[in-house]
Amino acid sequence: MTKTDKDLIPVQSLLMPKPIVYTAMLLNWISPFLASRFAARIFLTPFGYKMPSREKKMFENSHKEKVHIKKINREVVVYNYGESDKKILLVHGWSGSGTQLSKIADHLLQHGYSTVSFDAPAHGNAPGKRSMLPFFIESIYQLEKSHGPFNAAIGHSLGGMSLLRAAKCGLQIDKLIIVGTANSITAITSNFAQNLKLSQKVGRLLKAYFDERYGEDIDNYSGATSAIDVKTPTLVIHDKNDVDVHYSAAQEIFDNLDNGELLITEQLGHRKILGNQDVINKMTQFILE
């Protein structure tokens, strides 16, 4: 499979082991309810990947430390990259790692900024088998206290959604940048079911299960919902060819922001966008303004 072909496949479909997909399809045929419970377990399971060579420089030159996130009783691995009092917090997406935004970190380093990033629980080198959005958010809150203050924060995909929620609830930053971020958790669960080749009924049951488990409508954590209360100047970046999150999500998030800017790109997809120099230049310009 060529790299171009991979860019046309959603991350979940690309990383998901085939036996899991076959099991989900069988359960879907037997019982949508059972399939939804199986899907819930898989939904919370990140699937890692071998570190690309482009991330190794950041990995090797970062000061790495294990940090215990008290509120969730989980451990993350923190990457302190560069030495500067001007700090940017970087937050990876689902199944990503703390070095996923390495090209962005390298460019910020050239402009006098150090970066702080982390492997979220059960991601990268952090221990655990399962993770969830609140784990990302609580990690952000604690790192602001222990490693901040941060001048700005950049989040990719679920990382962007986490930062929007954190900014809504008091994260103190001057600028926020989100890339390829979803606007709706309902849409995420629906797309997840689709990627597992499950029926939309299973997708609805999956969403209902999480609502019941956490005692609230989990769409309260959706990007567009959080954006309503975000006052921080925010740059929303999304690609028209993103197969993981439709670019209409960016417009919906932007429409709800008090002080937003929107950049829509083409032919970069969900992942390649993180290494595009024009996009990185725009991020840096936005932070420096």
Image (spheres, helix red, strand yellow):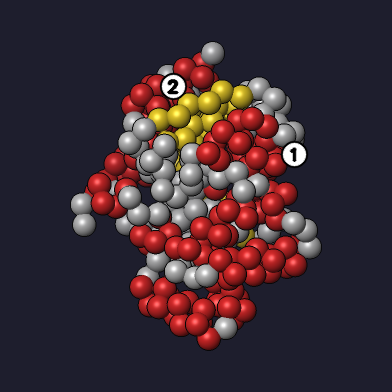
Q: Give the quarter of the image for residue 161.
A: top right
260 w.r.t. 31: above or below: above
| Residue holding disc 2 | 282
**Is the residue marked by circle 1 packed among few (<14), some (14-19), or many (20+) residues within 10 Å?**
few
> Which of the numbered marks, if any, corresponds to residue 52?
none
Report the residue that reaches farthest toward the top. Answer: 289
Disc 1 or disc 2, which is closer to the eye?
2
Secondary structure of the residue carrying numbered label 1: loop
Seen at 36% across and 33% down, the residue is 266
77 w.r.t. 116: above or below: below
Which of the pair 14/52 is nearer the observer? 14
Report the residue that reaches farthest toward the right. Answer: 215
| Left or right placement of residue 190 versus residue 170 in this view | left
| Residue holding disc 1 | 169
Q: Can residue 250 be seen in this view?
A: yes
Seen at 69% across and 66% down, the residue is 208
Q: Give the quarter of the image for residue 70.
A: bottom right
Q: Can residue 40 be seen in this view?
A: no
